């Protein structure tokens, strides 16, 4: 579940080697893992072309080639660079390979069933060019199935970026823990199905490395998940207010409110301008509706301290009205979304100042809203990856940021971050973001800490979209949460 940057992975290798496991042993195990996945991908006797690079990634390739050749595969091996330039463990493994070594530049792809890409992994240091780039492009043009060792060559393991050009693999095998580049786009699209192989690195090294990035899976947040108590009642599960916009823009707030209630908030109230009240009232049943025409009205409503949590943004309108409403609720648990975020365009420090007193705040921008909020912050918008952008944004805002998309990143001001990889493409539909804000609010209302609530909400949202399947509209997500909850509760040992 931890994600290690290539640098952190290098430290994990180094710790392990320093503690008595030789690098060559790790490399033998890495090559064995590659050979195993190759064997699952392609039957005995098939023709495998192993492309080896100049570093240790190439060393893994030499091992895999030897093991496959020894178990009935017809293996050719092609090397990028000179054999006598190989160093360390890679040189040792080249010495254990007794077959021919072709130059990679002119290698033929005729009569090949599977390509093993062992060109570059964690050591990719610059954009591919020249011979390396031409080779990668030739592999992609061949249309042959590719198994990537560690990372598809050309993908930056820390950022997921394509460095010049990158292999498009059908399978990838990485070692010990995935890297951010396996989950961040475009890296994830280049990697295919990912296998994470144990190669004998003791997980105790994680205590030294203290990774700060994680895959967004239940193990990350389930300890904090608010399973309803047998002796509980609705007032123990929080009262959430969804702040609504005007009569012509009420749907987003209803999606938010329904999602919050479904996610487990004890009570949910929609606070709306008086003209919008009949519309909400006619369309809601378990959710309460209160007239709130301006910020002063909202402040009066919030004199009741039991209203602990607010979601503000969906449909609320961009401008001073939204900003004033935030002032009225800034000391509560908060989910900030959509129009509220846009209302602070280029003014993140004012927003940060306002929400300083909030006990738990989450902002859920998509890329466009993020760019607006951090307009004028080139250090944040220009950070090297989506992971680093979200982290830098969270630190500046002083709140958890959920930077949405196919590779949603959840980042806390303290540097913890998670990347979600479970959202299907049909989740990108109008109103899906309003539902996400509601789920996050529903979890916050039940007392979940902000980072865990945000990560939990993003995962649940993706699972609900999988559950609903293609053709999904945002309303379906709310219903689809039920089977997802049933499975999660069963996993947590809660009554279902
Ligand atoms: N002992 C270890 O550290 C282990 C390492 N393993 C493997 O080792 C890999 C990392 O090995 P390395 O650190 O040697 O790095 P790589 O083998 O990924 O690449 C480094 C080599 O590529 C060259 N290079 C980098 N960018 C280039 C570019 N754009 N164009 C042309 N050449 C470029 C470098 O000069 C260097 O020769 C991992 O991805 C993994 O596959 C595994 O065997 C497990 C154990
Ligand atoms: N290509 C994609 N694959 C999976 N999920 C996506 C993709 N694009 C967007 N999403 C998700 O869809 C939701 C859209 O939210 P948002 O952009 O706020 O839209 P809206 O305002 O219409 O609700 C977010 O949860 C986002 O992470
Ligand atoms: K590779």
Image (tube, rainbow, N blue to C red):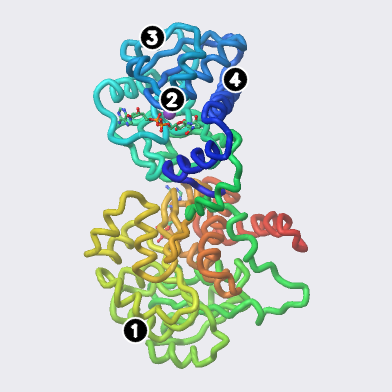
Res 376 → quadrant: bottom left
Give the image quarter of residue 100. Answer: top left
Q: Earlier in the sequence, mark 1 or mark 4?
A: 4
Frontmost of labels 1 and 3 is: 3
Please determine whether, in this image, residue 135 is positioned above or below residue 357: above
Indicate the position of residue 356 as horizontal and vertical percent values.
40, 79
Nearest to N terminus: mark 3 or mark 4? 4
Residue matched to label 2: 88
CB of mark 3 within 8 Å of CB of mark 4? no
| Pointer 1 residue | 324
In three-dimensional space, the C-alpha distance between marks 1 and 3, rounded to whole angstroms, equals 70 Å
Q: In the image, is 353 to the left or to the right of 289?
A: left
User: In the rendered image of this protein, does residue 452 appear above or below residue 10?
Assistant: below
Residue named by callout 3: 102
Q: Is residue 101 above or below residue 316?
A: above
Q: Secondary structure at mark 3?
A: strand
Quarter containing ligand 2? Answer: bottom left
Q: Which residue is mark 4?
A: 39
């Amino acid at each position: 579940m931890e994600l290690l940057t290539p640098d952190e992975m290098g430290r994990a290798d180094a710790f392990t080697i320093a503690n008595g496991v030789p690098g060559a042993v790790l490399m033998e195990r890495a090559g064995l893992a590659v050979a195993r996945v190759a064997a699952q991908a392609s039957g005995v006797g098939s023709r495998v072309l192993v492309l080896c690079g100049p570093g240790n990634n190439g060393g893994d390739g030499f091992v895999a080639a030897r093991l496959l050749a020894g178990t009935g595969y017809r293996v050719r091996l092609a090397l990028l660079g000179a054999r006598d330039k190989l160093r360390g463990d890679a040189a040792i493994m080249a010495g254990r390979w007794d077959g021919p070594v072709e130059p990679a530049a002119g290698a033929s792809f005729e009569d090949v069933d599977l390509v093993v890409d062992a060109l570059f992994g964690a050591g990719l240091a610059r954009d591919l060019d020249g011979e390396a780039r031409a080779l990668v492009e030739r592999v992609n043009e061949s249309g042959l199935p590719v198994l990537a060792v560690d990372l598809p060559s050309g993908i930056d393991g820390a950022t997921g970026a394509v460095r010049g050009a990158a292999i498009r693999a059908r399978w990838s095998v990485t070692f010990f823990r995935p890297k951010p580049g396996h989950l961040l786009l475009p890296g994830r699209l280049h990697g295919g199905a990912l296998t994470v192989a144990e190669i004998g690195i003791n997980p105790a090294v994680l205590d030294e490395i203290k990774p700060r990035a994680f895959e967004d899976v239940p193990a990350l947040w389930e300890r904090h998940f608010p399973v309803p108590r047998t002796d509980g009642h609705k007032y123990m599960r929080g009262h959430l207010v969804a702040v609504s916009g005007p009569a012509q823009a009420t749907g987003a707030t209803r999606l938010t409110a329904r999602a919050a209630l479904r996610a487990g908030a004890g009570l949910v109230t929609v606070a709306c301008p008086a003209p919008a009240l009949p519309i909400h009232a006619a369309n809601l049943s378990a959710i309460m509706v209160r007239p709130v025409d301006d910020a002063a009205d909202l402040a009066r409503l919030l004199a009741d301290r039991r209203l602990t949590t607010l979601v503000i943004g969906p449909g609320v309108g961009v401008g001073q009205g939204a900003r004033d409403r935030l002032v009225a609720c800034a000391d509560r648990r908060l989910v900030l979304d959509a129009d509220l975020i846009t209302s602070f365009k280029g003014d993140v420090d004012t927003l940060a100042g306002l929400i300083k007193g909030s006990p738990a705040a989450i902002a859920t921008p998509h890329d466009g809203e993020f760019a607006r909020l951090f307009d004028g912050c080139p250090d944040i918008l220009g950070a090297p990856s989506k992971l680093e952008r979200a982290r830098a944004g969270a630190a500046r805002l002083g709140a958890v940021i959920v930077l949405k998309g196919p590779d949603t990143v959840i980042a806390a001001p303290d540097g913890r971050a998670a990347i979600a990889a479970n959202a299907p493409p049909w989740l990108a539909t109008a109103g899906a973001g309003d539902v996400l804000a509601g789920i996050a609010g529903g979890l916050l209302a039940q007392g979940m800490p902000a980072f865990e609530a945000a990560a939990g909400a993003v995962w649940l949202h993706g699972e609900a979209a999988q559950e609903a399947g293609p053709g999904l509209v945002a309303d379906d997500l709310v219903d689809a949460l039920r089977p997802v909850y049933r499975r999660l509760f069963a996993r947590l040992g809660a009554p279902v």
